[in-house]
Image (cartoon, coloured by chain):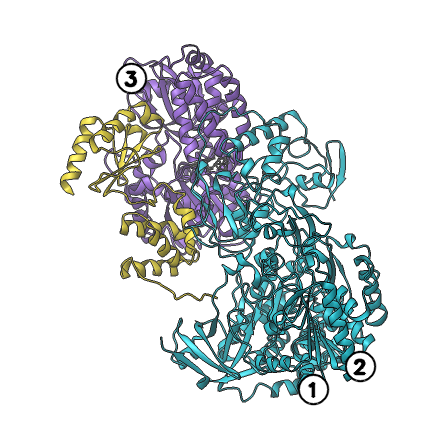
Chain colours: A purple, B cyan, C yellow
Amino acid sequence: MMNYPQVLFKNRKPDRIATLEEYRQSGGYEGLGDALSKASHKDVQQVLLDAVLLGRGGAAFPAGRKLMTVADDAPHPRYIVCNADEMEPGTFKDRVLIHADPHMLIEGMIIAGYGAQAEKGIIFIRPEYESAARILEREIKIAKEAGYLGKNILGNGYSLDIVVHRSAGRYICGEVTAQLNALMGKRANPQQPPPYPTEKGLWERPTVLQNVETLACMPHILRNGPEWFKNLALTETGAGTKIFCASGKINSPGCYELPMGIRLSEIIEVHAGGMVEGSEYKACLPGGASTRFLPREFYDIEMDFDTLRNVGHRLGTGAIMVFDQKTCLVAATLNLVEFFARESCGWCTPCREGLPYIRDLLRRLEEGEGEEEYIPMLQQMSKHLWSSYCAFAPGAVSPVESLITYFEDEVREHISQKKCPFK
Amino acid sequence: MPKIIIDNHEIEVPEGTKVIEAAEQLGIMIPRFCYHPALGSVGACRVCAVKFLEGPFKGVQMSCMIDVKDGMIVSTTDEEAVEFRQYVIEWLMLNHPHDCPVCDEGGHCLLQDMTISGGHGMRRYLGLKRTYRDQYLGPLVQHEMNRCIHCYRCSRFYQEFAGYFDLGVMQSANRTYFGRFKDGILESPFTGNLSDICPTGVYTDRPSRFFGRRWDYQRSPSLCINCSLGCHTTASARYREVVRQEARYSEAVNGYFICDRGRHGFHYARNETRPRRALIEGREVSTEEAIRAAREKLAELVKSAGPDSIACLGSGRSGLETQAMLKQLCQEKGWQGPSYFMDKSLAGKVKTAVSRLDPELAVSLHQLEGSDAIIVVGADPINEAPMLALAMRQAQRHGGKIAVVDPRPIFLPFDFTHLPVRPDEINLYLSALIKGAVDPQLIAEAGKGAAEFYQVSPSLEIVADSLQEKASILAQELRAGQKVVIVCGTQIVRETTPALAADHAQLLRAAKKQVGLFYLLPQANSFGASLLTGDEVSFSEILEGIEDGRVKSLILAENDPFYNFHDRQRLDLAIEKLDLLVVLDYFESAAVKKAQVFLPTSTLYEGGGIFINQEGRLQAAPKAYLGGISIAQIGGGNHPPRVYGRDIPGGEVRAAHQFLTQISNGDQIEDDDHTQRSLLRWIADNITPLPEIPPFDELAENGMRISSSDNTPPYFAVKWQEEKDKGNGLEDSLEIILTDWTFGTEELSSFSPPLRKLERSPCASMHTKDAARLGLDHGDKVKIKLDEGDVEVDVCAEENMASGAIVLPRHRLLEWQKIKSFPKFVSYEDVKKVST
Amino acid sequence: MKCNVDLTYAMIPKELKELLARQIAGIEHPRELVVDVMFAVQDHYGYLSDEAVEEVAELLDMSPLEVEQLATFYTFIYREPVGKYVIHVCDSVICWMEGHESLLDHLSGKLGINLGETTSDGMFSLLPVCCIGYCDRAPAILINKKVYGPLTIEKLNDILERLRAEA
Ligand SMILES: Cc1cc2nc3c(=O)[nH]c(=O)nc-3n(C[C@H](O)[C@H](O)[C@H](O)COP(=O)(O)O)c2cc1C
Ligand code: SF4
Ligand code: FES
């Protein structure tokens, strides 16, 4: 097995969390010290941009660019929010990261906070991750005692406080603007820009929101430089490592830190222990429930944002869910749509009403009551769900669309046999 | 200004105009559910999708969410957009019940229209429909949640626009539910608007349920006369009765909304108790007989005691025609009056307000929404004129600062600063605040009048210690404000306040601010009454005349002094003494019962009428229907009886001004339009100049503002020295302040059965400190000794009001008319707990 | 103007109320705490009763409806009574593929309740939940927010017995 450099998982241990001391020994908080003493917040933005650090929460937006959109003369206080909601089905990397090395996230937040000149940090975390929330609260205190948080950090004049905010659980809370509404004690409906959160976010103040993994990359970039980070990837277009969470019909489900651009086949066969006995690879969702099924023909694809985009797919969160030849993908899609229909925030019509409609069609297909015309209906309806208010619904129909694109025959068998061929 | 091409038509619109709005200006009505001009765009329903062909946006996008930009080319008929909209409608119909045949919204349902025009006809969805449980929301609004299409208009109106938080959105996904935390009466006094803005039948007008469909109704533009703002309404009549009233758009006045008092205040016109037949000594007679009797008796009196033995009382709830006719008669016949006000002081205040309403200062409700600071003196918006509170909320939402100087426990649905001071201190506080807010340099430059006024007027030092901080913050906020409006009431304030408000508006203007002046008047047409008021006798003087036998006959034209006059004992004795009481009115009042001759007059809905609102806006309402007793009442609930004849049953009612002509001059009456015009001309020729009044239907949307200021304003006329001396020696007494409540005090709406269900029972509000001194707790019963006996009422102990005052509602269920004169003070000994 | 006598009766313990009030007073934007306050009050009652909604509203100077708008939005706020142990069975795609259905059937049969119900002894409630972020331990469930997985029928039986014994 190839041994790739472990950056984010450097201090990961099977049974416990890395302490502040261990984190420090591995170079932790050096990047921060350098940044605060030698670099301006503009430099930090530039370094992150040069490193091509793309958001790991699913949308792949360049982190450096996001920081740059905070105007110099924008009002204070400003906020840095860490998105630890992680409710995308199949995704559990943020949880593992926090349990491995919480200070990496804390340092990342301070760096991003510095880059935005923010004075308030909030970690938004889902209720299922109560143990992670407690770890963070404890380690935040420790970091504060060590002078990394609070007033005048490391004597360099910059101040930041971080609090942990527990959510009460809804997938849509992971979407940036919905999350800000949730934080303000409003219903977590998304809010279409303009204004962008970096202009008017929490309490009308500039707010930068990043995923846990994105933030965790930052200390390393600042310490080792953008070139180093880019070179971690195996592909030209990629940068850095990526934590892939593998699950489904594989022998070793779990989180693996691997270079960006690593082949899917290698992830499955080498790192995730291969397909389980008697299973053959049929398809995977490469980046969570809101990405498209990657069929066999892409089995060797290089997993980075650009490569997947170029073939009409998305890397999303890098949560690889593997389906085998014995799994009915109509049933799997029905399950996924069930999830989305339940989790829709209920704000806009296509998502609120269209998803239950799609669910109904899929259920009929799965139960052998399908009709030929359901296939074009599913296609058209999915297409129109892209005109919903936020990115939730386009994500929700991604499995449906790719089901028909790649597995239309399987769908048709349900109709012609008047039953699920897998039952 | 950017230009856009929509469906091959080009239009140029102001920056910030949404594509959906630009299209509407071109006459292209893009479908919409969630967008509403007053509530703005939120992009929730997705039915306004159009295709952007050129410009910064491409593809299918929501036209309500995108500002017009140069270079945009948009198609509303593009196949993809049309198909998408079709889907949106199909989605919305998945769960919508097919209850159109029994739904009260049927026929004016936006969803129905869109479903049909959007081309969705065949149901494809085979799944079950979602169902919800409905809630009881009170007597005005019916809830039927299954019909909901989740446009969020209701919660956005209710919470964001109106500022109440007991109705909103619960649950999520396709279980999203709009309603209250628990069943119960909605707290907002603006709930009827829910029925107007709901694009389908989730919220419908409850009192008029199952009465008819929109197309069954005779719908006509009308006016609300339940307060002085003059909101525009649409009256719906069917089977000879008005059954529903809705908000009618008026840019200048009420925008898209009205309050519940206005919406449901019309029942006096349809109640079964409404007297429809003429009476002589309580006996039903033909109208002609009653007219003849009145005319003959009046003639006899003129002969025996002279024309000045006859006196007339009109009111501020009559149309201008009746008010003017009354005036004309008095002038021509030498009768006394008319008086339109119950006391001289009120008449004086209204008169001052009307004459000081400089056209440069007068602002409409709409303009007030755009102000950045509002100072309210002696007015309680939510209770006196609810739509004023809604307009003020819009100013506040846009960052405006609001201050209220008033002794009453003021509630407003937004953040504001309240300076609870006694009525005699209102002037001082107004002055202090404004003085603190203007730049002395600018005042000095503005000329001698302003400078001298500024010099002598009291400054922030007079403010009580406990209010110092609030007052100085307020003064700063006012100083920062560029568009400042002074709102001034006329009911509880001292006589000098209206003039002082105008003076201070002038002072602000001298300090280079954009200034607005906004008076509240006691009744819908108090403005008209005031225009017509010269140096006639006051009602009090009429009573004196009756008392010493000079006045022998009283004509009451649409005024019930038994409801409105404060000194009941005196009134009772005087009325007893009369030789002749002629009453013209359209509801069953105490005065009607005492009349020797009673003539049933038409309401606004049957007679139409001209009203001038508090801002000087002349508005005209046409007839809504021909009048007569409703078919339901004639049939006793059964099928209408088949009585053949040409006349409308109960159609003997006439406009009060017609009766007035008839009892004075004979039987000839002219048609309405002619009378209206000739009376307007008469006013213009004899009383006050009026501009050219165009055909009334051209006034439909915004009316027409007429200037009333007398043009030689004695600016800065108030003598401060006198002012400061007042208000002394009151320390150990409580001032009785009579107030309006949203429901239960205003005369016309107090006849409304649905509104009666919302009335609170009367209570006496006093400051907790005063209550404590009197040994009273919130909820105790007290006996208050007034001049003519006691009243018993519950105590409301409040923190947010002036101490040294007792606030009593002018409630139909409270005998407040035991007061000889105002201001009225009682001692602490006069207020006693009643043990129960 | 409020005219009705104010009926404020404290139902959560005074100390808890004061603690929450202090936290609320100490923060610039109290509404950031609404979820925390709902959780705290829910922990006290076991679920967020109507009275609890009203108490949360009072603490945060919100209307009960405003609290309800949030309480009913979230998965982990219970507006109806639940058992001592709330079992959330993950039904998202990986757990589904790994046999969540048979787990659920087993649980249902063993406890004698359907999804959304509580055992008559008030011990267990059974609720569905979407992906809990433990797909590497599928099929997984939560019991009072603690994760168990990967589960087999036997393991599940053990857990239930242990919980019953502890109770
Ligand atoms: C429906 C929806 C759910 C999302 N959930 C999450 C989430 O749970 N965690 C996350 O980090 N990002 C989530 N995102 C992406 C965020 O909106 C946002 O892009 C991201 O958190 C930004 O951080 P990044 O740039 O560091 O990735 C979600 C987006 C959508 C549309
Ligand atoms: S697509 Fe619409 S309903 Fe769905 S989550 Fe986004 S805003 Fe809410
Ligand atoms: S009107 Fe534009 S989305 Fe509803």
Judging depth in this view, the residue of B383 and A339 nearest the camera is B383
In the picture of the structure, the residue carrying the numbered disc 2 is: B303
Q: Please tell me in which quarter of the rendered image ligand 1 is found.
A: top left
Residue B306 position in % (x across, y down): 79, 83
In the picture of the structure, the residue carrying the numbered disc 1 is: B549
Q: Is residue B291 above or below residue C110?
A: below
B771 lies left or right of B80 = left
Q: Residue furthest left?
A: C165
Residue C63 position in % (x across, y down): 43, 55
Q: Chain of mark 1?
A: B
Say what amino acid the circle numbered 3 marks: Val
- Residue at image coords 66%, 69%: B521
Q: Is residue B122 above or below residue A72?
A: above
Answer yes or no: is residue B352 visible.
yes
Q: Chain of mark 2?
A: B
Q: Nearest to the eye among marks 2 and 3: give it.
A: 2
Q: Quadrant of residue C77?
A: top left
Residue B591 position in % (x across, y down): 62, 72
